[in-house]
């Protein structure tokens, strides 16, 4: 771990922690604003996302203390667009998830070849967040349309 830029890794981990905590609040807030016929599955999906964001925040915090540093007590930026139809919520969610994914990619680049534990963690999170973004993308497609709402190569920091 000698060559790891620890300050940079901790700063990225703190931004990840803050972004994931913002996700907990964002998904909980959205889940309170879903009305209509499909309310029940959408509310439960959003609450699952809130719980997953909390797990991700806790994992990022554990990585910070693993490095012997102090975890942030701040929450990332929260936007309220006051648009509460499900499609607008999904689009906003895809944007926020893309920002978190870009932070995980930066962390992966920072740790690659320098710290197996941080590298492995970041790689797993890029995988998990990319699958998650693709799930939201599929939810944004119109029934019968296969093409991605937002093609993978357009995700920030993607090396494809
Ligand atoms: Fe996450």
Image (cartoon, rainbow, N blue to C red):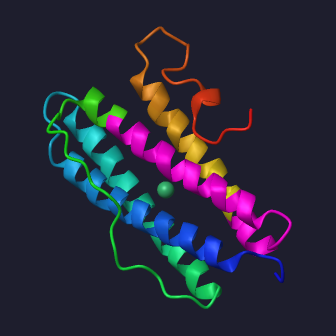
Tell whether 73 sits left or right of 7. left
Give coordinates of residue 143: x percent, y percent: 42, 12
Magenta segment, prevailing SS (helix, strand or loop): helix
Q: Is residue 105 above or below residue 116?
A: above
Residue shown at the point (73%, 38%) measured from the top left: 159
Residue at 75% across / 67% down in the picture? Answer: 111
Q: Is residue 113 left or right of residue 63?
A: right
Quarter of the figure with the N terminus: bottom right
Give the percent coordinates (x, y) of residue 100: 50, 52
Residue 54: x percent and y percent? 41, 66
Image position, residue 126 (x, y; %):
64, 51
Asked if residue 41 is positioned above or below residue 149 in the image, the reply reads below
**Residue lying farthest top?**
144
Residue at (48%, 21%) from the top-left corner?
A: 149
Which residue sits at x=25%, y=44%?
43
Q: Is residue 141 above or below residue 51?
A: above
**Left or right of residue 52, residue 105 in this image:** right
Quadrant in the rendering for residue 7:
bottom right
Residue 156 occupies quadrant: top right
**Which quadrant of the figure has residue 95?**
top left
Q: How many marks do you count on the picture?
A: 0
User: In the rendered structure, does residue 99 fall within the stretch colored magenta?
Assistant: yes
Position of 106 compared to 101: left or right?
A: right
Residue stretch rendered in magenta on the structure: 92-121
Q: Which of 78 and 145 is in front in this view?
A: 78
């Amino acid at each position: 771990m000698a060559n790891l830029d620890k300050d940079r890794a901790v700063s990225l981990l703190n931004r990840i922690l803050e972004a994931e905590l913002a996700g907990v609040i964002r998904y909980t807030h959205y889940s309170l604003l879903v009305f209509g016929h499909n309310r029940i599955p959408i509310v439960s999906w959003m609450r699952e996302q809130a719980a997953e964001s909390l797990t991700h925040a806790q994992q990022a915090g554990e990585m910070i203390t693993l490095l012997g540093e102090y975890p942030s007590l701040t929450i990332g930026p929260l936007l309220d667009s006051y648009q509460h139809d499900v499609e607008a919520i999904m689009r906003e969610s895809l944007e926020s998830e893309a920002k978190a994914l870009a932070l995980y990619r930066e962390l992966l680049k920072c740790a690659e070849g320098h710290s197996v534990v941080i590298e492995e963690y970041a790689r797993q999170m890029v995988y998990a967040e990319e699958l998650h973004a693709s799930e939201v993308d599929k939810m944004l497609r119109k029934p019968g349309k296969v093409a991605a709402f937002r093609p993978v190569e357009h995700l920030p920091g993607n090396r494809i």
